[in-house]
Image (cartoon, rainbow, N blue to C red):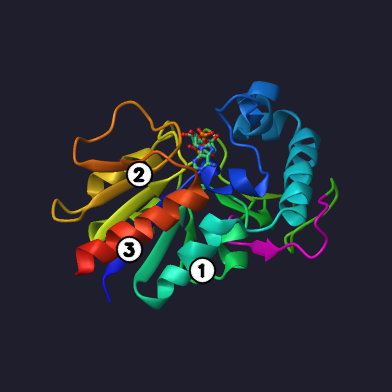
Amino acid sequence: MKKLVILSGAGMSAESGLRTFRDMNGLWEEYDVMEVASIEAWHRNPDLLIRFYNDRRKQMIESKPNRGHILLAELEKNYDVQIITQNVDDLHERAGSTNVLHLHGELTKARSSVDPSLVYTLVDPVMKMGDKCEKGSQLRPHIVWFGEAVPAMDDAIPIVESADYLCVIGTSLNVYPAAGLINYAPASAPLFLIDPNPPASLPRRVQVIAKGAGEGVAELMNRLNALRK
Ligand code: APR
């Protein structure tokens, strides 16, 4: 089967009711990103970050996969679909996608604040100060904060390099290194981008589908079918 690689961002989950970051009413309009999503903020005020991610986890639990997530899962019938997401929600997985790589971590997990290899799936969705890892250190959200490395890039790059098709969905392509992944696509791979307000500077060969994720993935399926004929 041909390999379809998806690079998704917050816009993928917008139709599930989860806020994006940089749109109108985005999360970074309400919160100072360096106060709630940076390693410095964690050292300064861990309780604030634990509460911020508890709120986002609660909203994730109350949301459900949208048409775009569901259609991407359906595409696994005809393609080797590899999803690389900047999102920390579990909506791709809950829609049925089976190959999901989270570049920026996962809300459903916590990890030791002294040993990053100790990662735990959260049973109680509410974290609190005093929750400890097996080494006795405070547990932290399993999220990649600003100022931290993105170890999953080592796995993401070869996936993009082996794509037959690449589709970017719902990301402003503002944040590196994730945004740079598009440049690793083979020259032979058709590139698509689904976004109602597409980023301004895109490689010329990108086919823009200026729609929301739900309608956009349906359009992508039609365009991929046309390529198979
Ligand atoms: N369908 C598809 N795309 C949408 C929709 C929708 N219904 N609604 C909005 N969008 C698009 C916006 O036009 C925008 O281009 O989704 C994109 C969201 O961009 P951002 O809010 O910047 O989110 P993202 O690109 O995922 O942010 C990247 O920044 O703060 C960090 O770690 C955080 O992973 C995040 C990273």
Give the amino acid type for the residue marked by disc 2 in the picture: Leu
Q: CA distance from mark 3 to mark 2?
A: 13 Å
Give the class, few, some or many, for how many residues have Cα within 10 Å of label 1's Cα (few <14, many ≥20).
many
Residue assigned mark 3: 4
Q: What residue sits 45% from the left and 46% below the top?
A: 150
Give the class, few, some or many, for how many residues have Cα within 10 Å of label 2's Cα (few <14, many ≥20).
many
* Residue 30 located left or right of residue 152: right
Asked if the residues shown at circle 3 and circle 1 are in contact, with their CB atoms under 8 angstroms apart, the answer is: no
| Disc 1, SS | loop
Give the amino acid type for the residue marked by disc 3 in the picture: Leu
| Disc 3, SS | strand
Dominant secondary-structure state across the stretch colored magenta: loop
Q: Which residues are magenta?
A: 116-127
The label number, if any, that marks residue 193 in the structure image: 2
Percent coordinates x, y for residue 145 in the rendering: 57, 38
Q: What residue sits 49% from the left and 48% below the top?
A: 213
Q: Earlier in the sequence, mark 3 or mark 2?
A: 3
| Residue 198 seen by the camera | yes
Q: Nearer the viewer, mark 2 or mark 1?
A: 2
